[in-house]
Amino acid sequence: MVHSIYSNKDVFLRELISNASDALDKLRLESMIDKDLQADTDDLHIEIDADREARTLTVRDNGIGMSRDDVVALIGTIARSGTAELLQKLRESRDAGANQELIGQFGVGFYATFMVAEKVTLVTRRAGEREGTRWESTGAGTYQIETVADAPQGTSVTVHLKPEDSEDNLFDYTAEAKIREIVKRYSDFISWPIRMTVERAGEEGATTSEVQTLNSMKALWARPRDEVAEEDYRDFYRHVSHDWADPLETIHMRGEGTFEYEALLFVPSHAPFDLFMREGRRGVQLYVKRVFIMDDCEALIPNYLRFVKGVVDAHDLSLNISREILQQDRQIQVVRRRLVRKVLTTIRDLKANQEEKYRTLWTEFGRALKEGLIEDPDNRDTLFEIVSLASTHDPAEPTSLAGYVERMKDGQTEIYYATGESRTMIENSPHMEAFRAKGYEVLILTDPVDEVWVEQVGQFDGKPLRSIAKGQVDLDTEEEKKSAEAEREQRGKEFAALLTWMTGQLQESVKEVRLSSRLTTSPACVVGDAYDMTPTLEKMYRAMGQ
Ligand code: ADP
Ligand code: MG
């Protein structure tokens, strides 16, 4: 499986550099927090070493390194974080398109080296530890591991390139020009020097060698927007997101005044498989004045925007701030509010101006965004503008809430909705009959989160949200009511005996049997009281064992 799946193999080098950069970030941070850490932090850098004869390429860093346990856990048999779940998903999924996507994700991370390598050797020593570890694998699922005495601090990864004539090797990755090109292209913004020793022809055939730094090291988020090429943004996105696809939207912002910060955020173009898993990763990294502080900074972005990726560099924070303190920090709260507003207004603008992008976004992240209606009352109005909901109005076209309100019939005061597992189930439910017959539009809500937000939010634009499955829904005009009333009285008398008998027969299961005005074709339906749980919610609680 290692062999068939990649189009652009150059990225293996980007991935190794990205890991080296992360390792240096971690070391700097750890040594600042833990003064006793026996670590060498003098000349933190990344080094690339190519050996043309041996056909090897080595990427070395003097960063945090890995213990033997780390190597087993992180690099292990299947060589990257998340790979096990990914493989599991591949096995479970029968959808070829989705598989293609999942496979694409193998293109990121350490495992990408096996696109070009017949063997990979990793030697590492964790800062502060005495012994190092040597790991070697051909990528076929097994590896050798041993303890070594004399490893330098940090990690070196040596890629033994496949033979030259192999179809996997269209490029010579040991060539200086090729290495330069890849580093410039993908890793220019890396904030640590990436060095390489290059040979130069000197006088009279002698060669001299010199060490060169290949990257400019400019933090992308600190540069003015008009100086950053789209391509740079994309490469940076790959670095922070570990995603293989391009981002859907880029948000580059800067806050001045009391709290200075820079933020470079991205909305991905597809949802990660763990978007709805509790342990799923969140995307925003926190830096303080160019110093990496932490991944997954939950204080900066609310849960419902967990799909947003990127970097926030806040200037006036202490470097060894903890996650707990961050949650309470006033500056972080201000920054968070601004980020949220900016992300939401960006999405709103997409909806207005870039229909296509908005659709992708809503399909991928709509379910998460709807959680915002519950979590974030302050931004509810903006969220209302973003939300799209399925409706009986047009099966092919979801509607906004404002769109629904515009189409409301004369005299209609409530927004009708139905919740359920699928559109078909809802449309076939007997509750729908009267609404269909009278031409009322009904919102069709099929996500589990819908149940919760409609309850919590209660109304839109002053119009109550009303489940068609609850209580007595009154759909008639005054005249219709009068004649219906007369008819009901008449029929009430007619059926009184039957109803009493049925209520008696069914008293174990229902509160009351009554004549219905809401059915047109079904003979009977079960309705809830106005304050009862909706059927889906009831099911949900039952499933939870309550
Ligand atoms: P990711 O970078 O997305 O976590 P990778 O497959 O690139 O996935 O790397 C897996 C893990 O291996 C990293 O998260 C890191 O913990 C560890 N690792 C990889 N390379 C290095 C390195 N050069 N130094 C220290 N740890 C590393
Ligand atoms: Mg990586």
Image (spheres, grey):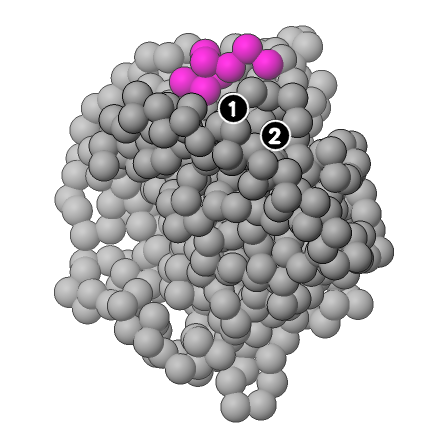
Q: Label 2 crowding class (10 Å Cα cut-off): few <14, some 14-19, many 20+?
A: some
In the foreground, 360 or 22: 360
Q: Is residue 68 above or below residue 251?
A: above
Q: Is residue 527 visible?
A: yes
- 344 or 17, nearer to the observer: 344
Residue found at x 51% / y 60% = 457
Considering the whole magenta stretch, tell me its main secondary structure: helix
- Residue 535 location (% of width, % of height): 42, 34
| Secondary structure of the residue carrying numbered label 1 | loop
Q: Which residue is mark 2?
A: 519
Of the residues shown, which amino acid type is indicated by label 2? Leu
Q: What percent of the width, then of the height, locates residue 313?
A: 51, 70
Q: Amino acid at mark 1?
A: Ala
Q: Is residue 236 magenta?
A: no
CB atoms of marks 1 and 2 within 8 Å: yes
For this orientation, the residue located farthest to the right is 353
The residue drawn where x is 39% and y is 50% is 531
**Dot 2 lies on which element?**
loop
Which of the two residues, 255 or 18, is positioned nearer the viewer here?
255
**Magenta-drawn segment:** 88-95
- Taking the view exactly as shown, the residue that stands out farthest to the bottom is 258
